[in-house]
Image (cartoon, rainbow, N blue to C red):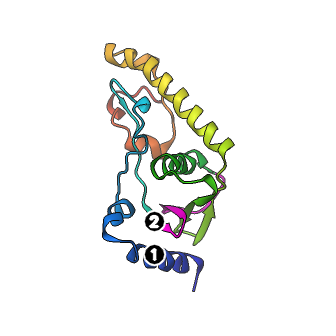
Amino acid sequence: MDCLYLFREEALFELAGISADHRDIACSKTLNLFPNSRFKEGNFTLRGGIDLAYRENDRFVIVDWKIGKSGSNDNSLQMLAYAWWAKQEFKRLVNCIIPHRVHLADDTVSTFNVNEKYLGRVEARILQDLDRMREADGYGVRGIAEAFTPCAQPKICELCQFQEICPKE
């Protein structure tokens, strides 16, 4: 048996053991990551989706499934944002939050370290990004496309709703 199979079986076993009143948390595809009103201002609401989350004794386990291989593209911001949310939402100590990323293409599981320092950085980054969005919003409202730089990342561009007007080369 490979590590992915074992991890999946353990996660499914844990999911089956969750009481009905908590199952909606574990099975949710879109959880509001930032319930704090400070992250919902005017036209801005920050949201995210967790693939799988479940409780295991006093721990809160978060799983993010990726169809690709593991590699150097370490997006720990996403995983630590999920951990930050779990700490706020469920009043968990940081050492009780266990975020995993499962790479299906090469059967690997990456576990992220969580500590107060990392979560503080994540919160600061989110607030900085929110400030940038506020600044850019006026340009978008006025239709000033030149204010926005194309990201030139194919996987992100595929999902972009502004492909028709994007000035990318």
Q: Is residue 114 left or right of residue 166?
A: right
Q: Residue furthest bottom?
A: 1
Please, is residue 83 above or below residue 7 in the view? above
Crowding at dot 1, Cα within 10 Å, few <14 / some 14-19 / many 20+, comes out as some
The CA span between labels 2 and 1 is 7 Å
**Residue, x 43% and y 32% (percent of image)?**
39
Q: Amino acid at mark 1?
A: Glu
**Residue, x 39% and y 72% (percent of image)?**
18
Numbered range of the magenta stretch: 55-72
Quarter-of-image position of residue 53: bottom left
Along the viewing direction, whichever of 24 and 75 lies nearer the viewer: 24
Quarter-of-image position of residue 22: bottom left
Along the viewing direction, whichever of 83 and 55 lies nearer the viewer: 55
Question: Quick one: SS at disc 1?
Answer: helix
The mark found on residue 163 in the picture is: none
Please, is residue 123 above or below residue 95 in the view? above
Identify the residue under disc 1: 14
Residue 137 sits inside the magenta stretch: no
Q: Amino acid at mark 2?
A: Tyr
- Quarter of the N terminus within the rendering: bottom right
Q: Are marks 2 and 1 in contact (CB under 8 Å)?
A: yes
Please, is residue 109 above or below residue 130 in the view? below
Residue 69 sits inside the magenta stretch: yes
- Image coordinates of residue 160 in percent, x first then y, are 38, 38
Identify the residue under disc 2: 54
Q: Is residue 117 left or right of residue 33?
A: right
Crowding at dot 2, Cα within 10 Å, few <14 / some 14-19 / many 20+, comes out as many
